[in-house]
Image (cartoon, rainbow, N blue to C red):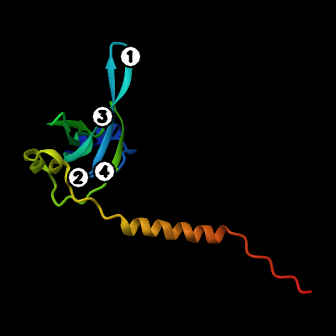
């Protein structure tokens, strides 16, 4: 990107974005204005593409709605996006998951999920260690 454009748009780039990648299941909270009212609307699906950089970065979310595939493109740095929640992580083997467009039913959302067994095991071990460290030491037995 041109350094001048990058410098001008640097203040508009969001820094508090939840990290997500292609293949992740996300819930996008978008602000919707209807007349003088404003509300938050959810759009949940699978991220099938991320494109661009800086202020121009976008991501495409695909979901099945009543058996029909629906895609929506969101600008990452849009002020209308309140937050992005990652529902499930995955291990996508490609940068773009456009092949999901030809799939229907459960196959349309079948992506290799991240094996989190080792991560969960490490969390349990850390919790046990913290609990053992927080527990008071047993009092020495009184000699009679």
Marks 3 and 2, how far apart in space? 21 Å
Marks 1 and 2, how far apart in space? 34 Å
- Residue nearer the viewer, 137 or 85: 137
Marks 4 and 2, how far apart in space? 9 Å
For the C terminus, the quadrant is bottom right
Q: Dot 2: few (<14), some (14–19), or many (≥20) neighbours within 10 Å?
A: many
Q: Secondary structure at mark 4?
A: loop
Residue extending farthest bottom: 144
Work out whether 142 lies above or below 71.
below
Q: Looking at the image, is mark 3 or mark 2 nearer the viewer?
A: 2
Residue extending farthest left: 102
Q: Which residue is mark 1?
A: 37
Dot 4 or dot 3: first in sequence order is: 4
Q: Which residue is mark 4?
A: 20
Dot 1 or dot 2: first in sequence order is: 2
Decide if residue 1 is in sight here. Answer: no
Marks 4 and 3, how far apart in space? 16 Å
Work out whether 144 lies above or below 92.
below
Q: Position of residue 41 (x, y in %)?
A: 33, 29
Q: Dot 3: few (<14), some (14–19), or many (≥20) neighbours within 10 Å?
A: some
Residue 78 image label = 3
Q: Looking at the image, is mark 4 or mark 3 nearer the viewer?
A: 4
Work out whether 87 lies above or below 12.
below
Q: How many marks?
A: 4
């Amino acid at each position: 990107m041109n350094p001048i454009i990058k410098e001008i748009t640097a203040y508009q780039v969001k820094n508090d974005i939840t990290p997500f990648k292609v293949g992740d299941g996300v819930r996008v909270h978008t602000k919707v204005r209807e007349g003088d009212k404003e509300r938050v609307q959810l759009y949940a699906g699978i991220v099938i593409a991320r494109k661009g950089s800086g202020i121009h970065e976008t991501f495409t979310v695909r979901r099945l709605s009543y058996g029909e595939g629906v895609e929506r493109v969101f600008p990452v740095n849009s002020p209308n996006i309140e937050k992005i929640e990652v529902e499930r992580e995955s291990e996508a083997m490609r940068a773009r998951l456009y092949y999901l467009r030809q799939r229907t039913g459960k196959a349309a959302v079948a992506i290799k999920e991240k094996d989190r067994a080792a991560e969960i095991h490490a969390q349990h071990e850390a919790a046990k260690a913290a609990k053992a460290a927080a527990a008071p030491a047993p009092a020495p037995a009184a000699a009679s």
